[in-house]
Amino acid sequence: MNKLVVFIIFSVLSFSVASSPSFEARYEFGRELELTISPSFADSAVYTLVTYEGKKILAKRVFEGSFQKWSNVKSESHIELTDDTYKKLLKLLDDALTFSIKDDVRVEDGITWELETSRYQWLKVRISTPEYDTESRGYSGLLELGAFVQAQFP
């Protein structure tokens, strides 16, 4: 009976460790950045920077409406980045990470930006309308990053 109890406890603990993957281990590739831009009443776009088989790939997924459900994917595309483009993207990401974490602006109808990255520490932040009072809130770098990734998909 004791062996059965030990086996069950070990199995449950092993399963829970294996079933709670880290940010990087959820995929068979390294995800460095995910930027979601969700207007209140329009389609949302998710830009993801990944490393796969040594290549730096920027992907774009457009969702119908502002909810990101797999059943609502309208389009998907991806490009392989050159080394120079990748370095510029990392520089823009560094600039985007200079915002104030104590920003308390919440706008009901606007554009919600969500930035998730493992550039330094794992970070995920949702920002309400960074176009509003951009300079004082510290979101100039974020808007530049957004403009850059959007420009990669004309």
Image (spheres, rainbow, N blue to C red):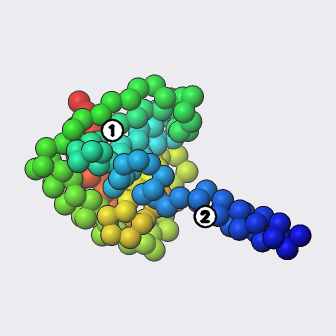
Q: Nearer the viewer, residue 124 or 7?
A: 7
**Left or right placement of residue 15 versus residue 45 in this view:** right
Q: Position of residue 114 (x, y in %)?
A: 44, 53
Count the marks: how many? 2
**Left or right placement of residue 79 versus residue 116 in this view:** left
Q: Position of residue 139 (x, y in %)?
A: 32, 61
Residue at 23% across, 30% down: 154
- State the CA–CA distance, disc 2 to disc 1: 30 Å
Neighbour tally class for label 2: few under 14, some 14-19, many 20 plus, Cα within 10 Å: few
* Residue with the most extreme left position: 84
Residue at 30% across, 34% down: 78
- As drawn, the label of residue 117 is none
Decide: marks 2, 1 in contact (CB < 8 A)?
no
Residue at 49% across, 61% down: 22
Q: Nearer the viewer, residue 124 or 111?
A: 124
**Left or right placement of residue 98 versus residue 19 in this view:** left
Quadrant containing the N terminus is bottom right
For mark 2, what is the residue?
17
Give the foreground label among 2 and 1. Answer: 2
Above-or-below relation of 92 to 46: below
State the SS at label 1.
strand
* Residue with the most extreme right position: 1
Label whose residue precedes the other's in the sequence (2 or 1): 2
Q: Amino acid at mark 1?
A: Ala
Q: Nearer the viewer, residue 117 or 22?
A: 22
State the SS at label 2.
helix
Q: Position of residue 151 (x, y in %)?
A: 22, 38
For mark 1, what is the residue?
59
Q: For residue 80, what is the image quadrant?
A: top left
